[in-house]
Amino acid sequence: MDVRLECSKILGAGLASISLVGAGAGVGVVFGSLLVSISRNPSSKAELFQYAILGFALTEAVGLLGLMMSFLLLFK
């Protein structure tokens, strides 16, 4: 296999995996906001927790898509 092609695949996979950093920061923001909102209004804890789980799932989906693209670049 061509060395330039292999280097390009590894570089692309590294750049695609940067999305995991954003996903980690996004999860921190989601749960940090959950703590702040529960401390302001404890009576709506159940509803706020449902929204936080939805936000967590959507944020993690973006990170997992980036990880999937990284694996596709490396192993295809």
Image (cartoon, grey):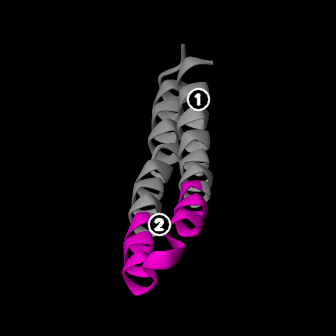
Residue 64 on the magenta segment:
no
- With respect to residue 12, does 36 lie above or below? below
Please state if 47 lies on the left or on the right of 39 as rendered. right
Please state if 65 lies on the left or on the right of 32 as rendered. right
Task: Work out whether mark 1 precedes mark 2 in sequence or the reverse, and give the earlier one.
Answer: 2
Q: Which region shows up in magenta?
A: 31-53
Which residue lies at the image location 50% right of the left edge and 37% below the top edge?
13
- Residue at far top of view: 1
- Residue at far front of view: 43
Amino acid type, label 2:
Val
Disc 1: which residue: 73
Residue 43 on the magenta segment:
yes
- Residue 43 position, x and y percent, is 49, 77
Disc 2: which residue: 30
Q: Specify the quadrant that holds the C terminus.
A: top right
Secondary structure beneath dot 2 equals: helix
- With respect to residue 40, does 38 lie above or below? above
Alpha-carbon span between mark 1 and mark 2: 30 Å
Which residue lies at the image location 58% right of the left edge and 49% below the top edge?
57
Amino acid type, label 1:
Leu
